[in-house]
Amino acid sequence: MDVKKAALLAGALIIAITTALLARSMFANNGNPTPQVAASVMPAQPDGPFVLVATKALPVGTIIDAESFRFQPWPKELIETAYFIKDDKVDTQQLLGSVVRNAITAGQPITQGSLIRSGERGFLAAALGPGMRAVTVPVSAQNSVAGFIFPGDRVDLILTQSVAPNGAEGDPLKVSETILRNLRVLATDQRTNAVGEDGKPEIRTYSNVTLEVTPKIAEKISVAQTVGSLSLSLRSIADNAADLDLAIADGNVALPNGNDPKAERTALARIAARPVGGGTFSTGADISRYQRRTVPQKPGGTPVALPGGGIARPTVGPVVRVAMGQQVTEVPVGGK
């Protein structure tokens, strides 16, 4: 091979190696962009102040919790003095348990005048829904779930009493009944939130519980306190949805006409939050066979008219109804 051919072969080999290296470098850059390119596609960090805004719609009377707000960048030219600004070192723990005075939409800044804090004048009145009342019930650790009921929870009210015999000898009838359901707890003693100074839930014992009720239910609770002892039964969070579904299936609730999802959601939330009457009860005989199931009556008492034209007299113990034609007679079978 002469010198000229050797030089051409060496030059071609050098060009091929150089081309391969350049191609490899180009493909490597496409897979891993340089730091300068990667930095250019990152979103710019906002330089405006951070304002406290509502994460969801907060109607009047809503009790503020940690899920109700967050800090969000806000344009400098739209900042108002009433806003809660993060640069001002706002202690959000002090806002927990506050009550919404004016309705706040989702994403709207929370202003200092839109909240009433615990202990301020008008706090309890702001926590009440339209047309609702606040009534206080005395409780103890034994009949208030050992202090694990907090403001914002929902409870059932149970009345326990002993019904004396009606002019007859014998033990009284012991009965316990759920008289009211789905009552919202507004406060325990003077405490309107369950958060301590360190921002963590704090369990305390208390002697009074304030409930949100309708005017008619407030009258019932006032009378119930003179009849027997009252106990609180804590409800599950999922119970409200289950009760609402059952009420809708039974046709006991009226939903708005038309195809307005917002109005329907508002109606459902209002219906799910309403307190309702009770309906269930248990007597001493449901617990022990040695207790009564009915109120003992004096033998030979005042006759009672029965359906169908029959006559029955109050008796002690279980009875059997005997129907003969149009006449119905109660015959005692003994027993306590």
Image: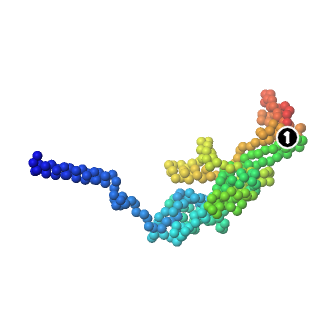
Q: Which residue is labeled 1 in the image?
A: 296
Amino acid on which disc 1 is placed:
Pro
| In the displayed structure image, the side of residue 305 where residue 48 appears, left or right | left
Residue 25 placement (x, y as % from top left)? 28, 53
- Horizontal side of residue 76 vs 67, given as left or right: left
> Is 308 situated above or below 111?
above
Q: How many marks?
A: 1
How far from the left and from the top, in percent, is residue 146? 72, 52
Q: Residue at x 65, y 67 (%)?
A: 120
Is any atom of residue 132 visible in this view? no
Work out whether residue 252 or residue 123 is closer to the camera in this orientation and state it. Answer: 123
The percent position of residue 311, horizontal first and vertical second, equals: 83, 35
* 318 shown above or below 111: above
Residue drawn at x 52%, y 61% is 70
Specify whether 256 is left or right of 3.
right
Residue 206, by quadrant, is bottom right
Specify the quadrant of the image occupied by residue 76. bottom left
